[in-house]
């Protein structure tokens, strides 16, 4: 019985395809998405077709069923399907249909902002607001929303999340977001002045600033965290998570040791 983790499946949610530019749009619709990003046209000018939604649903379901066995354990870290506050039989039936298409019997749900507890509770082995799993001796804190600190964080527990659709990839990977990079670079150039603010020095300063990022044992397990060579929607296995966290281990231990020393001082 292996464990797998995924987030932000958003089954049945057409708008998520254009908001996150998921690979289920036609060439023309992708062009419209570019115009939307530039602010040239409003989001309402692009209506995602039912065919695109079905393609997304089938792709994610196939990716899950191709790696997760019937007797394995699957944790969906929020935003299962577009059925929030659903009270009609139609929404309930749709949620049941998506759940039934997942072959795994043991599916746990960490509630996201698009999930209705009362509607979805009967469909899953268990549902939680957040939960601290212990799997093969490893503590894993699962929350739909990314956290800066969490239970057992100082003792090597991992934090898996969704919700932000891989917007925090740069921070998780030791870099700066586009916004923070812009703000810091602008500030450095203003403080240093035109004579000192050469590109090389700015990059060095940005490197120092970014060194505080990416050393928490965190990862976005959402489907929009696309991994090279891995089909869209494929859940993360424990081996996937171990390999990912191993790359951060040395930097995390260094920072954790500094934190402990500062506490004593």
Image: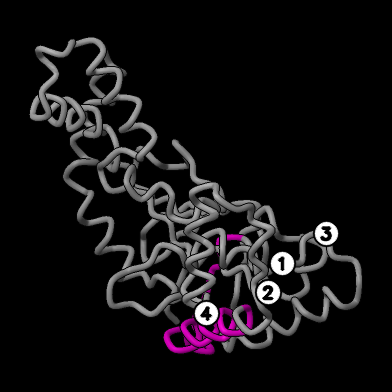
Which residue was labeled with disc 4?
A: 60
Q: Residue at x 17, y 25 (%)?
A: 205
Between discs 4 and 1, the one toward the N terminus: 4
Q: In the image shown, does 18 or 99 lie closer to the viewer? A: 18
Seen in the image, is 197 located left or right of residue 123? left
- State the CA–CA distance, disc 1 to disc 2: 6 Å
- State the CA–CA distance, disc 4 to disc 2: 11 Å
Q: Residue at x 53, y 89 (%)?
A: 70
Between discs 4 and 2, the one toward the N terminus: 2
Which residue was labeled with disc 1?
A: 82
Looking at the image, is 134 positioned above or below residue 235?
above
Between discs 3 and 4, the one toward the N terminus: 4
Locate the C terminus and report the quarter of the image it occupies.
top left
- State the CA–CA distance, disc 4 to disc 1: 15 Å
Q: Which mark is residue 85?
A: 3
Between discs 3 and 2, the one toward the N terminus: 2
Between discs 1 and 2, the one toward the N terminus: 2
The answer to whether the residue labelled 1 contacts the one labelled 2, judged by CB atoms less than 8 Å apart, is yes
* Secondary structure under the numbered disc 3 in the rendered image: loop
Q: Which mark is residue 146?
A: none
Characterize the local packing of mark 4: few (<14), some (14-19) or many (20 or more) Cα atoms within 10 angstroms: many
Residue projecting furthest to the front:
40
């Amino acid at each position: 019985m292996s464990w797998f983790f995924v987030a932000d499946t958003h089954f049945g949610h057409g708008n998520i395809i254009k908001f996150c530019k998921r690979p289920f749009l036609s060439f023309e619709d992708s062009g419209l998405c570019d115009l939307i990003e530039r602010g040239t046209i409003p989001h309402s000018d692009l209506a995602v077709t039912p065919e695109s939604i079905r393609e997304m649903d089938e792709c994610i379901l196939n990716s899950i069923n191709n790696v997760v066995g019937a007797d394995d354990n699957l944790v969906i870290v929020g935003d299962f399907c577009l059925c929030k506050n659903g009270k009609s039989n139609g929404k309930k039936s749709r949620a049941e249909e998506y759940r039934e298409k997942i072959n795994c019997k043991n599916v746990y749900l960490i509630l996201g902002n698009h999930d209705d507890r009362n509607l979805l509770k009967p469909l899953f082995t268990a549902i939680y607001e957040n939960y601290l799993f212990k799997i093969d001796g490893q503590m894993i804190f699962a929350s739909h929303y990314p956290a800066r600190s969490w239970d057992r964080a100082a003792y090597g527990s991992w934090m898996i999340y969704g919700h932000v659709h891989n917007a925090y990839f740069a921070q998780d990977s030791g870099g700066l977001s586009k916004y923070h990079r812009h703000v810091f670079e602008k500030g450095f150039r203003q403080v240093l002045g035109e004579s000192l603010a050469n590109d090389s020095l700015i990059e060095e300063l940005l490197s120092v600033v970014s060194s505080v990022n990416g050393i928490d044992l965190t990862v976005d397990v959402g489907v929009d965290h696309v991994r090279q060579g891995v089909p869209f929607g494929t859940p993360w296995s424990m081996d996937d998570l171990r390999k990912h966290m191993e790359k951060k281990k040395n930097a995390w231990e260094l920072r954790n040791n500094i934190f402990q020393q500062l506490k004593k001082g």
